[in-house]
Image (cartoon, rainbow, N blue to C red):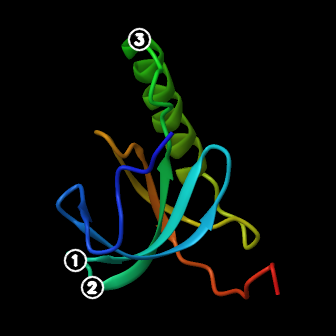
Amino acid sequence: MQAVTGPGRVIAARYELLDRIGQGAMGTVWRARDLVLTREVAIKEVRLPDLMPDEDRKVLRERTLREARVSAKLNHPGVVTVYGQHRGDAAGCAGQLAPGRDRAS
């Protein structure tokens, strides 16, 4: 599996990736700039395995969209706000960039 994005890349003609702030088995979270609203956001990029069949890729992209839709309905101080979703090679969602510190330190 490889990431299809990187710093400087613009996702969905709106979000400019600035730097990677987290990575796990299912994908990467980026600090990004919303070029329309001029604010910093978090971008969750779902990583699709290289050898995944097209039908399975479609299912995973749809699951990501459902997750974004459900998450966008939540309103709680302990849950980040989801602003939108994006599809294509880098399926995922955009949301609130919550301040924090590196958990590795």
Three-letter residue code for mark 1: Leu
Q: Where 85 falls versus 56 (above or below)?
A: below
Q: Where 89 falls versus 76 (above or below)?
A: above
Three-letter residue code for mark 3: Glu
**Residue at figure coordinates x 54%, y 77% from the top left:** 97
Q: How much space separates mark 1 and mark 2, taking CA atoms?
A: 5 Å
Q: How much space separates mark 1 and mark 3, taking CA atoms?
A: 32 Å
| Quadrant the C terminus occupies | bottom right
Q: Where 67 falls versus 6 (above or below)?
A: above
* Residue occupied by mark 1: 35
Marked residue nearer the N-terminal end (1 or 3)? 1
Is label 2 in a helix, a strand or a loop? loop
* Residue occupied by mark 2: 38
Q: Are marks 1 and 2 in contact (CB under 8 Å)?
A: yes
**Residue at figure coordinates x 35%, y 57% from the top left:** 5
Is label 1 in a helix, a strand or a loop? loop
Assess disc 2: are there few (<14), some (14-19) or many (≥20) residues with their C-alpha within 10 Å of its C-alpha.
few
Determine which quarter of the picture holds residue 15: bottom left
* Residue occupied by mark 3: 55
Query: In the image, which is nearer the foreground, mark 2 or mark 3?
Result: 3
Three-letter residue code for mark 2: Thr
Query: In this orientation, which residue lies closer to the viewer: 98 or 9?
Result: 9
- Percent across and percent down for residue 75 are 65, 62
- Percent across and percent down for residue 12 are 23, 55
Query: In this orientation, which residue lies closer to the viewer: 8 or 50?
Result: 50
**Residue at figure coordinates x 48%, y 69% from the top left:** 30
Marked residue nearer the N-terminal end (2 or 3)? 2
The numbered mark at residue 47 is none
**Residue at figure coordinates x 50%, y 31% from the top left:** 49
